[in-house]
Image (cartoon, rainbow, N blue to C red):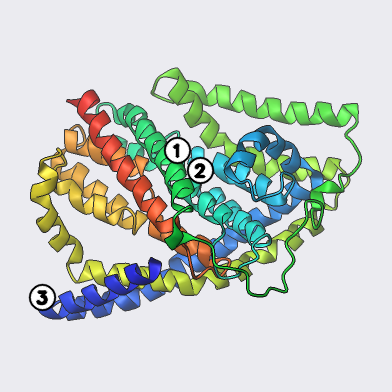
Amino acid sequence: MLNYLWLGLILSGVILGVVTGHTEAVTTATFDACKSALLNIALPLGAIMAFWLGIMRLAEKSGAVEHLSSVLRPLLKRLFPEVPADHPAMGAIVMNIAANMLGLGNAATPLGLRAMQDLESLNDRPGTASNAMCTFLAINTSSVQLIPSTAVGILAAAGATHPTAIIGTAFVATCCSFLTGITAVKLLQRLPMFALPPIISSDKKPDSATENLPFLKIPHPLSLWEKLLLLAYAGLFLWAVGHLLPLQHSSFPIALIQSISLVAIPFLVGFFPLYAALKGLSVYEEFIEGAKEGLQTALRIFPYLVAILVAVGIFRAAGGIDILSRLLSPALDLIGLPSQLLPLVLVRPMSGSAATGLFAEIVKSCGPNSYAAQLAGTILGGTETTLYVLAVYFGSVAIRRGRHALAAGLLADAAGVAASLVICRLVFR
């Protein structure tokens, strides 16, 4: 499906560019997308990945990931029946989901890429996405986000009376998106058109439940004073959360989540090295070993980033989004979607930065307290950049046949938009 979508974006963009006289804009967009893929995404992502993969190695080697994954193991086992319960992918998936829920994108992406690499170790059809990979992508393209911090921040900066009012509506929308994504991915994998191809030959042996799992060799148990030290460390951050609560201008549950989000990254950055050191690990050496994978992963995903960013850039520069908006506007007016929001809906699965820019324009033109701004913020918080996520995650493990992952992700996005329309009509009108 990605083949047809990519080809369609490229050809339609080029043809529209010629017909509308935007060939210069198409050319500029092509080279800008190439430069952006390397300088704005691949290289920064490589550095961020190096750091978080180093932290992840400490978490694995110390046994912290095993303890964390055991909490959600019954649920994960139902979602990922093909993955052994004690495989390292389970821990990476748990940490990725937690980071996504808290809106910690800089941590969620590296952890997600690590999970994809672990899932690839179980994949006996290289180049083709397994059912577990498609399920994990569906979770990422429809992940439940507790606070749409980007949308709230833009509304607050624009002077909205109640910028946090969209938190509840966005949460409902993202829950509907998540349930739709999980349901769709499980149903679509049964269709013949998305069936897994037969295994012809493979020299790769899937990991067993006890093979290559660094955290199974758990170092010595913690002594009483070491446990007390960890409790003191956790207590410091609980105090920090309590200290930040009065500074959040929102209701208590929302203020609590906002405060936790602010201290989550510093807490994890300090906790895992401390825990690993107490377990007797050489934290610096282990961190370096994990960090070595970061730049390699960035180089692997670079061609996939170029492909998707160029296709989207050409289509936008040629005026494809504007033409689709004009064609679909009469039909979408019937379901209550303001015409000025249609470009946001069309761009959101393709580009997060472009969607954020369109949202800022909507807030500026319609007003931060308008229904259009509140609906747009809910849509932004209830949907995901599906094409970008698929390109990055599949690119990290050289997956060329994504099977039903794209269809499930787009269905989840559609459900998020539909839920946003319903809940915003009930709450804001």
Question: Residue 214 at what x, y percent from top left?
Answer: 81, 53
Q: Secondary structure at mark 2?
A: helix
* 254 relative position to 343: left or right: right
- Structural crowding at the residue carrying mark 1, measured as other residues with C-alpha within 10 Å and reported as few (<14), some (14–19) or many (≥20): many
Inspect the image, locate mark 3, and give the three-letter code of the amino acid beneath it.
Thr
Judged from this view, the residue extending furthest toward the top is 252
Residue 8 higher or lower than 414, as above or below: below
- Asked if residue 73 can be seen in this view, the reply is yes
Front-most of residues 23 and 409 = 409
CB contact under 8 Å: marks 2 and 1: yes
Residue labelled with disc 3: 20
Residue 177 higher or lower than 260, as above or below: below
CB contact under 8 Å: marks 1 and 3: no
- Structural crowding at the residue carrying mark 2, measured as other residues with C-alpha within 10 Å and reported as few (<14), some (14–19) or many (≥20): many
Q: How many marks?
A: 3
Q: Secondary structure at mark 3?
A: helix
Residue at the location (69% across, 39% down)?
Answer: 69
Inspect the image, locate mark 2, and give the three-letter code of the amino acid beneath it.
Asn
CB contact under 8 Å: marks 3 and 2: no
* 285 relative position to 184: left or right: right
Inspect the image, locate mark 1, and give the three-letter code of the amino acid beneath it.
Gln
Q: For the residues marked 3 and 2, what is the alpha-carbon distance in whole angstroms?
A: 40 Å
Residue at the location (34% across, 58% down)?
Answer: 351
- State which tag comes first along the sequence, 1 or 3: 3
Residue labelled with disc 1: 145
Q: Quadrant of the C terminus?
A: top left
Q: For the residues marked 2 and 1, what is the alpha-carbon distance in whole angstroms?
A: 6 Å
Residue 9, by quadrant, is: bottom left
Residue labelled with disc 2: 100
- State which tag comes first along the sequence, 3 or 2: 3
